[in-house]
Each structure stands twice: as C-alpha cells, then as structure tokens.
Image: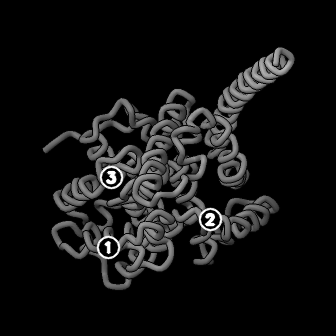
C-alpha cells in the first residue's frame, strides 16, 4: 500500500498546477487522490484496488505520443476537479455527476493516435468507417466504456442500474464535447446561462436555476470539458511555452504524414517549415477559440478568473514574439528589395 500525495504539496487544487515536476507514476497516485478528495470513494463504495487498477489501466490506454498522452489526460482530469472544487461549480451537481465528470475527463483522449479527425477521414482509417462524426471522440468514449465492462476495473460497480446508466450518459456528453467543432455550435447556449446568472440576486437562485435543468447542466459540463482540454493555454508562461511546443510538434508530425502518406500539402499549423509562425498561430488560437471560454467562465464564477488572467498573460507573451518575428521579416524583405533594385541598376 502506497501513501497518496498531499494535494497541498502538488497544488492539486490550483488552476496553475503543472505536471512537469511529477513522474507518470506519481500522476496515477494523484489521480486516485482526487477521487478521495471529492468524497466519492466511500460514498459509492469503490473498492480501493478497483480504483487503483482502473487508474493504471487508463494510464496504459494512452499512447506514448508527443502531446495527447497520459500527461494531457491527467491534466484534463485535474482541471475538471479544480473547476468543481476551487471554481465552486460542484454546487450545481450531485456527487455522482462529479464522480462521472472527473472520471470522464481522465479518459477523454484515451488511445489517441496523435492525428486529428480530418486525418482519420483522409487516410481512410478504420475508425473513420466505424464512426461517422466526432470520430476520435467516439473512439475514446467506446474505449472508456469497454474498460467499465470488466468488473475488476469498474469503479461504478456498486451503483444501481439507473445510476450506472446516468454515468454512461454523462461520459458520452463529456467526451463527445471535446470535439471542438461542437464547441462552436454550443457556446452561445453557455453565454445565455451566464447572462441569466449575472442578473440574479442570490446564489440560491442560481443553484436552483441550473440544478433543476438537466440541459443547462449538460451545456455547462460540455463547456467545462472544453475549458479543461485547452487549459494548458492558461498556465504560467514557463509551462505554456513548453506545452505549446509539444502540441506544435505533434501537429508537425501529422503534417509530415500528410506529405509522405497522403501526398498533400499540410495547413500552416501542421507545416514544420512554417514553425516560425507559431507565435502568430497561438495569438489567433487564443483570440478565436480560447478567449470566449475563459472570459465566460470568469463571468460565471469569479473563482475561475485565474484561468482568464493566465490566458491574457500568455497572449501578451505570444503577441510580443509574433510582432518581433514580423518586424524581423519586414527588415529582411526591405533588404532584399534594396539588393534587387541595386542589381537592376547595375544590369
């Protein structure tokens, strides 16, 4: 029997948590600890050895790839935990719902191949034939559900049938929500909920408004999954700058495959020959994808403002670098023009 880590030591309740100082095995014990912290182990009679076996198996389900690996899976679970506890979103959800949300977050990218949905389609991968839309997300979901069919791994084994079906439904909502294509369709629904909450006098009124409406709870849960999945963009700059390079490297690996296997020209984001444009791409990603999520969450619950602050700080860092690169390119262009003009005069 191994001692579980103290959450304070590793900042497990903090939005700024970083996995870098922790070993992969250490992250497994951290994951187990988070379930004890939300008090679901005793309440739902989860045998310690089943929880441990499940956590190890989830870890093993992640491939050894550049970014979408176990460390990313863990980070998404830890951010979900932090949104519920530190971000105080737990008050709208039952203990069972919180249990399912954290578990689904850990599993959300299990068995990821390091290539995106479009690549599965273009390369005619078996997964693309199996699932019509949200190809990878449906695979992560099926993989997660398959683990729970093994009784020795089923952390929900002592739930009744109705509760277990609820859990499976929440897994589906949470994992499918990590398809960013769906986030763009759903985000105005979240904004409407936040608008309504802002006008309310009391916390009780807000709790009632959300907790009696399953649809609202699912919209918030879906937005939480997006906020967790993208949370690296909100981390302290030393962490974000490292993670961005990991994401970029995985994208460039896909770009290489598109060139060699598919014989297609990759988009700039996946083209390693355009690696210098990473800062500009990051600023665009922050502006067009990330800002909405974290701005709305900080309006929803002020406790979540650190994520928005971190995002804005990283935008400044990336923008500074993008501007420096653009300035450098301008100087080179002007120099080239001068040389061409001089050559033309000579000729």
Residue 123 visible (yes or no): yes
Residue bearing the label numbered 1: 145
Residue found 71% across the figure and 70% down from its top: 189
Extreme-front residue of the structure: 347
Disc 2 to disc 1, how far (Cα)? 23 Å
Foreground residue among 227 and 287: 287
Labels 1 and 3 touching (C-beta < 8 A): no
Cα gap from disc 3 to disc 2, whole angstroms: 31 Å
* Horizontal side, residue 272 vs residue 71: left or right: right
Vertical side of 251 occupied by 319: above or below: above
Q: Residue at x 22, y 58 (%)?
A: 57
Q: Point out residue 245 in the picture as x, y percentages from the top left corner.
A: 49, 36
Counting from the top left corner in percent of width and height, residue 282 is at: 63, 41
As helix, strand or loop, the secondary structure at mark 3 comes to helix
Nearest to viewer (mark 2 / mark 1):
2
Corner quadrant of residue 26: top left
Percent from the top left, x then y, of residue 207? Answer: 64, 66
Q: Which mark is residue 36?
A: 3
- Mark 2 Cα shell of 10 Å, populated few (<14), some (14-19), many (≥20): some
In the depicted view, which residue is nearer to us: 177 or 78?
177
Q: What colour-coding does the image apply?
A: one colour
Which label number is shown at residue 3?
A: none
**Mark 1 to mark 3: distance in Å?**
22 Å
Displayed quadrant of residue 309: top right
* Location of mark 2 (residue): 183
Question: Comparing marks 1 and 3, which lies closer to the viewer?
Answer: 1
The disc, 2 or 1, on the residue closer to the chain's N-terminal end is 1
Q: Residue at x 16, y 58 (%)?
A: 49
- Position in image of residue 256 (x %, y %): 44, 48
**Circle 1 sits in a helix, a strand or a loop, which is it?**
helix
Residue 4 visible in the current orientation: no
């Amino acid at each position: 029997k191994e001692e579980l880590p103290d959450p304070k030591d590793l900042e497990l309740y903090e939005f700024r948590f970083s996995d870098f100082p922790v070993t992969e095995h250490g992250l497994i014990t951290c994951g187990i600890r988070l379930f004890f912290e939300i008090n679901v182990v005793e309440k739902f009679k989860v045998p310690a050895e089943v929880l441990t076996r499940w956590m190890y198996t989830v870890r093993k389900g992640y491939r050894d790839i550049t970014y979408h690996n176990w460390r990313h899976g863990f980070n998404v679970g830890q951010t979900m935990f932090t949104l519920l506890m530190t971000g105080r979103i737990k008050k709208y959800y039952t203990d069972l719902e919180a249990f399912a949300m954290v578990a689904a977050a850990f599993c959300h990218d299990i068995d990821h191949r390091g290539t995106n949905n479009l690549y599965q389609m273009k390369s005619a991968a078996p997964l693309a034939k199996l699932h019509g839309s949200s190809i990878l997300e449906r695979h992560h979901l099926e993989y997660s559900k398959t683990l729970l069919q093994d009784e020795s791994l089923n952390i929900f084994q002592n739930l009744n049938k109705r509760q277990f079906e609820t859990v499976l439904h929440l897994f589906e909502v949470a994992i499918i929500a990590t398809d960013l294509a769906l986030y763009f369709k759903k985000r105005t629904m979240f904004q409407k909920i936040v608008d309504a909450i802002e006008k309310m006098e009391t916390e009780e009124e807000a709790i009632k408004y959300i907790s009696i409406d399953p649809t609202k709870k699912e919209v918030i849960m879906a937005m939480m999954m997006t906020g967790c999945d993208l949370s690296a963009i909100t981390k302290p700059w030393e962490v974000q700058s490292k993670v961005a390079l990991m994401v970029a490297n995985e994208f460039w690996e896909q770009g290489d495959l598109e060139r060699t296997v598919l014989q297609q020209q990759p988009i700039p984001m996946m083209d390693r020959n355009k690696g210098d444009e990473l800062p500009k791409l990051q600023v665009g990603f922050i502006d067009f994808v990330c800002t909405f999520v974290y701005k709305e969450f900080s309006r929803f619950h002020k406790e979540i403002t650190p994520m928005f602050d971190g995002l804005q700080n990283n935008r400044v860092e990336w923008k500074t670098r993008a501007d420096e690169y653009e300035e450098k390119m301008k100087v080179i262009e002007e120099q080239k023009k001068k040389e061409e003009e001089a050559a033309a005069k000579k000729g």
